[in-house]
Amino acid sequence: IGDVLKSIDDKISNNNRINAELESMAKTIYDYWFTQFDFPDENGKPYKSSGGKMVWNEELKREIPEGWEVVNLESFINVVRGVSYSSNEVSADPKEDYVPLLKSNNLQNGRLILDDIIYVPKANVADNQYLSNNSVFVTMSSGSTEHVGKTALIPFDTEYCYGAFCSKIEIKPEFRCFISCFFLSDYFKRLIRTIVIGTSIKNISNEHLTNNLIAIPTNTDSYIINSFEKLINPLFDKQAEIIKENQQLAS
C-alpha cells in the first residue's frame, strides 16, 4: 500500500512540474512576442531584432510595432465577482444541494490547491460564478498585500465556485491565450504590486483589471494573434489534462 501511495504522490509531483514548465513556456513566448515584440514577421524572422519599424506610443510611454494600436482590456474580458455567503451557511463537508467553493488561499504559486475546501448552498451561486474554461482566477482582496492580484489559469469547466474576495476573468475564446498570458505575466504582477503598494490598499477593483492598456495588431484577425493562439492552445489543453489527472489520482 505504501508503494502504491508513493507512486501516486510521485506522479502528482511530476505532473505539477510538467504543468509549471508548460506555463513557463507560454509566458516566455508571450514575453518575446508581445513585450519584446520579437514575434515572427512574414519571413519568419523576429520582428524588432530584424529591424521591424517601431513607433512611439504616448499612452504606453514606449515604442510599439508600426500598424499596432493600444486598446483597453474591457474589449476582451468580463469580470465576475465571487459568491457571497454567511458563516452559518458554510459546511466543511459535502452535502446535498451544496457546491465546493474556493477562496484566495486556494490559489498558490499560480495554481489551484484543492485542499481546505468549503461548501456553500447551490442556491447562492449564479450560473456564471463557477470557474470555467477561457478564464483566469484572481484574488481581489486579502489580509496580505502579497496575495492581491495573484492569478491562475482555468483551462476547463469546473464544479467549483469561488468566494467574494475573488473574481473570474472571462475571456473571449478567440483571445484565450493572448489575454490569459497577459494576466499570468510578470508585467501584470508588477502592475498590481505598484497599485497596492502605492495606495496601501489590500484589494483591487474590476477597473484595475478592465482598464489595463495593451498593444495589439490593428487587425485582430492578423496572423500574429492567430499564430500565437495556435501555438499556445495545445499547452493550455495539456495543462487541463494534467490537472484532471491529478484530481483523479488524489481521489
Image (spheres, rainbow, N blue to C red):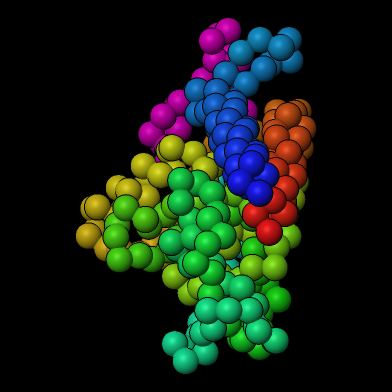
Residue at 42 percent across and 54 percent down: it is: 149
- Residue 126 in sight: yes
Q: Identify the residue at the far front of this view.
A: 1
Residue 232, position as x, y percentages in the image: 70, 33
Q: How many marks?
A: 0
- For the C terminus, which image quadrant? bottom right
Rendered position, 47 above or below 15: above
Q: Residue furthest bottom?
A: 88
Instruction: State the extent of the magenta-drawn residues as a range.
Output: 47-68
Q: Is residue 198 magenta?
A: no
Q: Residue at x 35, y 65 (%)?
A: 142
**Residue 1 picture location, percent across and down:** 66, 49
Of the pair 1 and 201, the residue shown nearer to us:
1
Up-down: is 209 above or below 65? below
Residue 206 screen position, x and y as percent: 47, 64
Which residue occupies 60% across, 15% down?
A: 47
Residue in front for this viewpoint, 136 or 211: 136
Q: Nearer the viewer, residue 175 or 64?
A: 175
Q: In percent of the image, x 73 and y 29: which residue is there?
A: 231
Q: Position of 71 compared to 195: left or right? A: right
Q: Is residue 56 magenta?
A: yes
- Rendered view: 241 above or below 125: above
- Seen in the picture, residue 198 relative to 22 is either above or below; the reply is below
Residue 172 seen anywhere in this rendered image of the structure: no
Percent coordinates x, y for residue 93 in the rendering: 58, 79
